[in-house]
Image: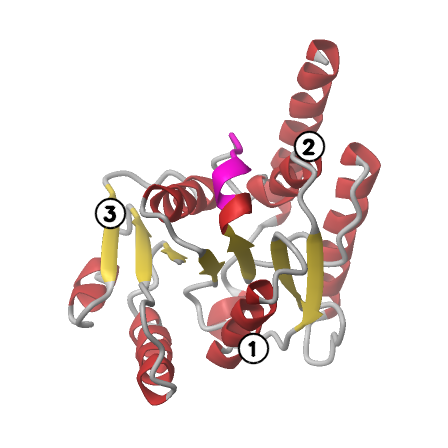
């Protein structure tokens, strides 16, 4: 599952590398899907040129959380045994996505997260602080600690696909998802991955204003559900 918004310049390379890996390793019964979240560029056209890739289009840009929810729903509705999510900007190596899949297939956890914080070499210091801060805030607010709660490289088994639901449409979903994992008593395992940072990938992701909005929204969710518990 690859959520994408205005990734036309890079998603072709990401898909080519992924499809090449699948063919080289003769993997069977694998579906590659892209959730095009209302892109205004040529993302959809680039994806359509890749034979066998499932393209799901959002008419409007709805946010990273909404795109992830669509992808997880597709996996659930189509009876996937496992689902791996990865970013469209080239930040994740295909080999690491394969490692996450291999780990989730061992049956030792319901959700496997590729942690970029096990080895922060090459990661800008402010990204390190942002991601560690996200993990700390998630723990303080929801009582679940995950080293890299903001990672987009995750694996889910069928049990997780059936149980996980969340409401956030933007990047807030990363922290809310951890909360829902705890609520559903699902198990998590983190494995180290290498994040690939380029000038392009560094221009994507959460801005300072979005971080403030995310904190406000998570606090609102927690307060509302506290009174409903």
Residue ID at (56%, 75%)? 99
**Type of colouring:** secondary structure
Mark 3 lies on residue: 57
Residue 127 visible, this orientation: no
Mark 1 lies on residue: 196
Residue ID at (54%, 45%)? 159
Mark 2 lies on residue: 183
Q: Residue 14's x, y, as percent?
A: 37, 75
Q: Residue 26's x, y, as percent?
A: 33, 84
Examine the rendered structure and indicate whether residue 141 appears above or below residue 55.
Answer: above
Q: Of the residues under marks 1 and 3, which one precedes in the sequence?
A: 3
Corner quadrant of residue 142? top right
- Say which quadrant the C terminus sits in: top right
Examine the rendered structure and indicate whether residue 154 appears above or below residue 119.
Answer: above
For discs 1 and 3, the disc positioned in front in the rendered view: 3
Q: Tag 1: Cα neighbours inside 10 Å, few (<14), some, or many (≥20)?
A: some
Corner quadrant of residue 174? top right
- Magenta-highlighted residues: 161-167
Mark 1 vs mark 3, CA separation in Å: 27 Å
Mark 2 vs mark 1, CA separation in Å: 32 Å
Residue ID at (71%, 24%)? 222
Mark 3 vs mark 2, CA separation in Å: 30 Å
Examine the rendered structure and indicate whether residue 202 appears above or below residue 139.
Answer: below
């Amino acid at each position: 599952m690859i959520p994408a918004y205005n990734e036309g310049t890079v998603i072709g390379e990401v898909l080519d590398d992924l499809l090449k890996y699948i063919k080289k390793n003769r993997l069977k019964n694998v579906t590659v899907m892209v959730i095009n979240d209302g892109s205004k560029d040529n993302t959809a056209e680039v994806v359509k040129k890749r034979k066998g890739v499932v393209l799901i289009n959002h008419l409007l840009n709805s946010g990273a959380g909404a795109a992830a929810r669509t992808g997880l729903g597709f996996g659930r509705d189509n009876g996937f045994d496992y689902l791996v999510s990865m970013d469209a900007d080239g930040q994740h190596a295909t080999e690491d996505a394969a490692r996450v899949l291999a780990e989730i297939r061992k049956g030792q956890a319901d959700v496997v997260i590729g942690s970029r914080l096990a080895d922060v070499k090459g990661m800008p210091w402010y990204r390190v602080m942002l991601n560690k801060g996200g993990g700390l805030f998630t723990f303080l607010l929801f009582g679940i600690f995950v080293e890299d709660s903001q990672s987009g490289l995750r694996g889910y088994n069928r049990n997780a696909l059936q149980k996980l639901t969340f409401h956030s449409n933007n990047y807030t979903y990363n922290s809310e998802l951890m909360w829902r994992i705890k609520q559903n008593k699902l198990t998590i395992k983190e494995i180290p991955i290498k994040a690939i940072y380029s000038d392009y990938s560094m221009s994507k992701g959460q801005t300072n204003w979005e971080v403030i909005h995310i904190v406000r929204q998570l606090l609102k969710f927690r307060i509302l559900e506290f009174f409903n518990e």
